[in-house]
């Protein structure tokens, strides 16, 4: 089987909701992936000062949950362990508006969770090096 590597080094800026999955995908195509993160990534599920919206409740749509589950083995189980609460929108929660037919009862496969649960789950399974307390002042280029 031919090598899938396309380069030696990849750098991802930010270890958040977009950065960690990006690092996981890049790990399949680069010898080494480094994630630069301004904050520390705590071992438990606590809020990060650099992520102001992390204290808000977030929902993960079914498609996103499946995509992240494909990238990170045991993603759903790790979310529950980290404190995520499963919520079947359409069955456990319904919204009705005056003058409109009720939303059909069906399981849309969402989970109610908070951002620290995703940070904790993704940061342990990217296959890359996460450099905490890093700031980026310039982005140098190289031939490779």
Image (tube, grey):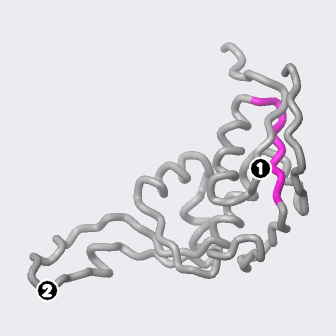
Q: Is residue 91 left or right of residue 137?
A: left
Mark 2 packing: few (<14 Cα in 10 Å), some, or many (20+)? few
Task: Quadrant for residue 106, please give it.
Answer: bottom left
Q: Classify residue 118 as left or right of residue 140.
A: left
Q: Secondary structure at mark 2?
A: loop
Give the camera-side residue of 70 and 16: 16
Extent of the magenta region: 30-37
Q: Majority secondary structure of the magenta segment? A: strand
Residue drawn at 84 percent across, 21 percent down: 144
Q: Residue at x 53, y 79 (%)?
A: 57
User: Disc 1 vs disc 2: Cβ atoms closer than 8 Å?
Assistant: no
The residue where tag 2 is placed is 98
Q: Is residue 16 above or below residue 46?
A: above
Is 84 covered by the magenta stretch?
Answer: no
For this view, does 107 lie left or right of residue 46?
left
Which structural element holds mark 1? Answer: strand
Packing grade of label 1 (10 A; few <14, some 14-19, many >=20) is many
Q: Quadrant of residue 122?
A: bottom right
**Which residue is identified by label 1?**
13
User: Looking at the picture, how far across and down is residue 68, in whole percent?
Assistant: 55, 52
In the displayed orientation, state which residue is furthest to the top: 2
What percent of the width, then of the height, locates residue 42? 81, 72
């Amino acid at each position: 089987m031919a090598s899938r590597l396309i380069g030696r080094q990849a750098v991802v800026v930010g270890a958040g909701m977009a950065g960690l999955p990006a690092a996981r995908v890049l790990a399949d195509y680069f010898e080494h992936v480094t994630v630069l993160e301004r904050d520390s990534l705590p071992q438990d599920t606590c809020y990060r000062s650099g992520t102001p919206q992390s204290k808000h409740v977030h929902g993960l749509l079914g498609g996103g949950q499946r995509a992240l589950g494909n990238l990170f083995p045991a993603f759903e189980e790790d979310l529950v362990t980290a404190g995520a609460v499963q919520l079947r929108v359409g069955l456990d929660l319904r919204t009705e508006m005056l003058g409109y037919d009720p939303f059909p009862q069906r399981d849309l496969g969402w989970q109610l969770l908070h951002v620290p649960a995703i940070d904790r789950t993704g940061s342990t399974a990217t296959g890359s090096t996460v450099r905490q307390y890093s700031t980026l002042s310039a982005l140098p280029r190289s031939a490779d």
